[in-house]
Image: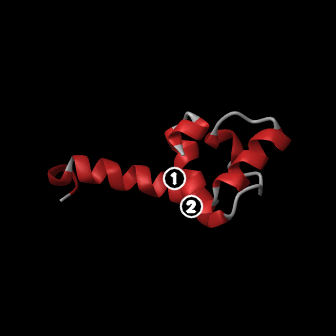
Amino acid sequence: LYDMFNSWHLALAAYNTGEGNVGRILQSKGVEDYWSMIGKGWLYAETEAYVPRFLAALQIAKNPELFG
């Protein structure tokens, strides 16, 4: 998915909702990144939340002592 979208954020969104959905949004709405997609009702709420939650989990995993 990263090779398809050249973006980890878009790859994560596509993993959650499907590459077809993300691809259609990119083409039809003229946006180029995940952050431009959110908050507009184009993605499911679950997918909008998936990417930030994944990024948060990644930060916690990288610094477990910082987060207890």
Q: Earlier in the sequence, mark 1 or mark 2?
A: 2
Q: CA distance from mark 1 to mark 2?
A: 9 Å
In the picture, measured across the screen, residue 6 lies left or right of residue 33, that is left
Q: Is residue 62 above or below residue 18?
A: above
Give the x, y percent position of residue 67.
Answer: 22, 55
Other residues around mark 1 within 10 Å, as few (<14) / some (14–19) / many (≥20) = many
Residue under the image location 56 percent in, 61 percent down = 16
Q: Are marks 1 and 2 in contact (CB under 8 Å)?
A: yes
Residue under the image location 58 percent in, 44 percent down = 10
Q: Secondary structure at mark 1?
A: helix
* Residue type indicated by callout 1: Val
Give the x, y percent position of residue 11.
Answer: 54, 46
Other residues around mark 2 within 10 Å, as few (<14) / some (14–19) / many (≥20) = some
Q: Which residue is mark 2?
A: 16
Colouring used for the render: secondary structure
* Residue type indicated by callout 2: Asn
Quadrant that contains the C terminus: bottom left
Residue under the image location 56 percent in, 33 percent down = 6
In the picture, measured across the screen, residue 65 lies left or right of residue 1, that is left
Residue under the image location 71 percent in, 57 percent down = 43
In the picture, measured across the screen, residue 31 lies left or right of residue 57, that is right
Q: How many marks?
A: 2
Give the x, y percent position of residue 13.
Answer: 58, 52
Q: Which residue is mark 1?
A: 51
Q: Secondary structure at mark 2?
A: helix
